[in-house]
Amino acid sequence: MKNGIRIEEVAWQDPEAAALRAQQRAEIAVRYGTPDSEPGTPPSATDIAVFVVARADDGTAVGCGGLRDLGSGIGELKRMYVAPAHRGAGAAPHILNALEEWAREQGWTRLRLETGLAQPDAVRFYTRSGYRRIPNFGSYEGLPTSLCYERDLSCAPAEAP
């Protein structure tokens, strides 16, 4: 545990993980003005390789994130989220670092992600964390509101707070 944040690997179906994902989807729906703004294939238990929950000192689940295996040593970050009341406390970097370390242990060499124009906070976070803008990939190709990023995992990890 660092800075009061503990990262725990959980099953996709874990009730607290599901509740955090529901909060994330509700926030995204408000930002984009639609309940279904998922431009790609929604993640599921069948295609998420690992899912983690960040917990505060008192055990409260405050954030989450997962990885989808895209093949050829590439993974995709999915459902990265920290509850608004817990933002700025260091959960997001800890989630990201845990997922990057898990990916490295699997022999993955790169992580990709998709975010959108209505998420400037996410863009800032990923850019600060060493992700660079790439052409939209997969089902995000040709979508003007999607922004895609990638990180080479052979680079040193971003420093957690």
Image (spheres, rainbow, N blue to C red):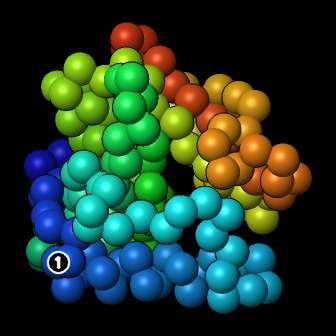
Identify the secondary structure beneath mark 1. loop
Residue sitting nearer the eye, 30 or 6: 30
Q: Is 38 left or right of 50, judged from the image as shown?
A: right
Where residue 111 sits: x, y (%)? 45, 32
Residue sitting nearer the eye, 10 or 158: 10
Q: Which residue is mark 1?
A: 14
Q: Going 20% across and 85% down the picture, which residue do you hit?
A: 15
Q: Going 17% across and 77% down the picture, which residue do you hit?
A: 14
Residue sitting nearer the eye, 91 or 16: 16
Q: Is 107 left or right of 132, judged from the image as shown?
A: left
Q: Going 25% across and 49% down the picture, which residue do you hit?
A: 49
Where residue 150 sits: x, y (%)? 57, 29
Residue sitting nearer the eye, 157 or 86: 157
- Is residue 18 visible to the viewer in this orientation of the structure? yes
Q: Is 88 left or right of 154, judged from the image as shown?
A: right
Where residue 86 sits: x, y (%)? 40, 71
Figure check: 37 above or below 73:
below
Q: Amino acid at mark 1?
A: Asp
Question: Image quadrant of residue 131?
Answer: top right
- Is residue 127 visible to the viewer in this orientation of the structure? no
Figure check: 106 above or below 22:
above
Where residue 119 sits: x, y (%)? 71, 60
Q: Going 66% across and 51% down the picture, which residue do you hit?
A: 139
Q: Given the current orientation, which residue lies at the most extreme right position?
A: 144
Quarter of the figure with the C terminus:
top left
